[in-house]
Every structure is written in C-alpha cells, then in structure tokens.
Image (cartoon, helix red, strand yellow):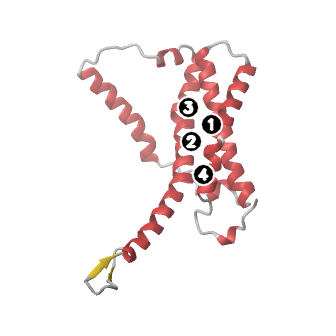
Amino acid sequence: MTIPPEEHAYPFWGYEDLGLFIGAVLPVLAAAALLVRAAGLSSKDARTLVYQFVFYALMLGTLYLVISFRYRRPFWSSLKWTLRFRGTWMLAGPALAVGLILLGAMLRAPSVSSPLENLLSDRRALIFTALFVVFFGPAWEELLFRGFLLPLLTRTRESSLRRFPSRCSTEPNPSGLGRIWL
C-alpha cells in the first residue's frame, strides 16, 4: 500500500511503519543467522562480527523498503541524513582517547583481560572491529534513532502537548456546584 506523500507532514511515516520495522527483527535475525552459517566461517569472533554486519544491512534494507517503496520518497533525504565533517570534532575523538589513556596511566589502572581481546587477535579482526566501533555502530544509531524514531516520537509528543492546555481548562459544572476539571 502506497500512501501519497502530500497528505503527511514530516515525518510522513507513523507507528504502523515502526511496527513493520520492529516486526521485521525476528525474520531478519533468522536470515542473518542462515547467511552467516552458509558463509562457513570457522572463527566464532568472525561469525559474531559478520552476523552483526548482516543484521545491520538487512534492517537497513527493511527501513529502505518502508520509506522508499511505501511512500515513494528518497531514502536518505527523507531521514534528513547529511554527511558533514567538522575538523574540531574529528580532533576531539583522538584527544579524548589520549586523555583517557593518560588518566588510566596516572591512576595506575590494572590490566584486565577482556572478551574484546579475542576480537582484536589478528589484523583482519582488528580492522573489522574498528570499522564497527568507529563507523557502522554510530552510523546505524544515528540513522535509526535520529533519522527514523526520534522524528516520529517528537511529532507525537508535540501533538499531545498542543492538546494538553485545552484538556486542563475548567468548565462550569452542569449541577451548578462549582467548576470541574476536564
């Protein structure tokens, strides 16, 4: 079912679309598991990373279907997705990392083994993990939350707040015994 775009303000999607997206999670999880199993990866850590990547890609495809095919709108601009790189933010991340390393050294933080060390065991796993931590994870969060979910929740909250003052007004009581709150 396609819905004419002129009938809706931004965001033009609604809770039905959110339900379609959430409803796709279980089938996508199963499809991702089948694809990873078919890939025949021997390392458990590699399977974990590939599984997460396939899950992200399939859910992105689901979101694309909801926006592009159902509403006949361009996907990236509908979600207000723009890529802007600002120099100060590009420098702030490494500065924060170096600052935390220095703070840990000053506080003499103990060396603790972590399950993440398995993901960082070889060069290929390190690169793939870095891509997830630096790019795929944040991009997915921005796209899903700020692009799709937040505009819908904001629109809903704004419409509720617009009706709130009229609901809190007082009206004369028909029995004549004072005023009632609606």
* Tag of residue 18: 4
Mark with earlier residue (4, 2): 4
**Does 142 appear above or below 129?**
below
Element class at badge 1: helix
Picture coordinates of residue 65, whole percent (x, y): 72, 50
Picture coordinates of residue 106, whole percent (x, y): 24, 22
Q: Is residue 181 left or right of residue 35?
A: left
User: Which residue is drawn at the image coordinates 45% and 67% (left, top)?
Assistant: 160
Where residue 52 sits, quadrant-wise, is top right
Picture coordinates of residue 104, whole percent (x, y): 29, 23
Question: For mark 1, what is the residue?
Answer: 56
User: Which residue is drawn at the image coordinates 61% and 50% (left, top)?
Assistant: 19
Contact flag, marks 2 and 1 (Cβ < 8 Å): yes
Which residue is at the far left? Answer: 107
Mark with earlier residue (3, 2): 3
* 79 vs 71, nearest the viewer: 71
Question: For mark 2, what is the residue?
Answer: 140
Report the Cα–Cα distance between label 4 and label 2: 16 Å
* Tag of residue 92: none
Identity of the amino acid at label 1? Tyr
